Image: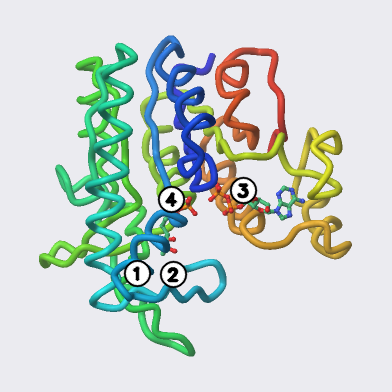
Amino acid sequence: MIDLFVIKVGGNVIDNPALLDAFLQKFAAIKGKKILIHGGGKIATRIGDQLGIESKYVNGRRITDAATIDVVTMVYGGLVNKQLVAKLQANGCNAIGMTGADANIIPATKRPVKDIDYGFVGDINTADVQGASLRALLEADLIPVFAPLTHDGKGQMLNTNADTIASSLAVALSKFYEVRLIYCFEKKGVLHSPDDDNSVITLIDRMIYEELKADNVLTDGILPKLENAFAAIESGVAEVLIGHADDVQSNTTDTVAGTLIR
Ligand SMILES: Nc1ncnc2c1ncn2[C@@H]1O[C@H](COP(=O)(O)OP(=O)(O)O)[C@@H](O)[C@H]1O
Ligand SMILES: CC(=O)N[C@@H](CCC(=O)OP(=O)(O)O)C(=O)O
């Protein structure tokens, strides 16, 4: 039986106040143990623009130079994280805001420079994720809320994709709990036609995934999301779902809406 929900909410939801408020209300109402991981890429891009710091992406990852790591640390670890915590508190949810540096929960290594220099982007040291410390917070009935930031153990903050953080935390916690990982975004799930919310693909396994890729059904951010979903399933996470932020509550029950990854 599932006894922990690891839930990720993406940038398009965070950037839409009505959708975000509805999501947080539903998240707060979910019974049982839960963790929230948030993105916020769009807000970081907007605030960067205001500061004259332009955003550049390669393969869905932000090139994070010295000025950009300061922006994302402020935006993800400060503005977005604390606003979400305050709104969850207002909904009666005892949230505690964190980055991967806090309690050393997510140690990472600066991505080595090969063809591309991503700058201060962190690859998670998966075996070192402190699942036991996180369990202690959960057992104290706190609700951890993670910003997409890690650290190198030598004093440097690193920027890490939020989908990857969610997958790594789900894997680390699956030692202690039966975990359902839920990716929440602004679509009803993985879609056959990206513009048609009624075209949800209800089940994707590796074979279907390869077929969908070959047919060019999957583009942009959905590709790394599915890779992270498969990585979780293949490393001990019981269930992974990709669905709409509005459906988060039903997706913690047996009546799921969205795409199940197997
Ligand atoms: N077949 C598809 N089904 C759903 N989304 C798709 C599909 N193909 C491309 N996408 C795009 O992938 C995006 C989700 O990835 P991303 O922007 O990284 O999400 P998040 O908001 O969680 O960060 C959707 O907003 C959508 O534009
Ligand atoms: C390295 C890297 O690309 N990090 C991401 C972290 C934020 C994120 O993942 O936000 P969404 O879930 O809203 O896309 C970035 O800075 O955009």
Identify which amino acid the numbered label 1 is placed on.
Answer: Val
Q: Earlier in the sequence, mark 3 or mark 1?
A: 1
Q: Which residue is mark 3?
A: 230
Asked if disc 2 is less than 8 Å from ligand 2, the answer is: yes
Please state if 129 lies on the left or on the right of 234 as rendered. Answer: left
Residue at 39% of width from left, 84% of height from top? 117
Q: Residue furthest left?
A: 155
Label 1 – label 2 distance at C-alpha: 8 Å
What secondary structure is marked by label 3? helix
Q: Nearer the viewer, mark 2 or mark 3?
A: 2
What secondary structure is marked by label 4? helix
Q: Nearer the viewer, mark 3 or mark 1?
A: 1
What secondary structure is marked by label 2? strand
Identify which amino acid the numbered label 2 is placed on.
Answer: Arg
Quadrant assignment, res 121: bottom left
Position in image of residue 25 (x %, y %) = 44, 18
Q: Which residue is mark 2?
A: 62
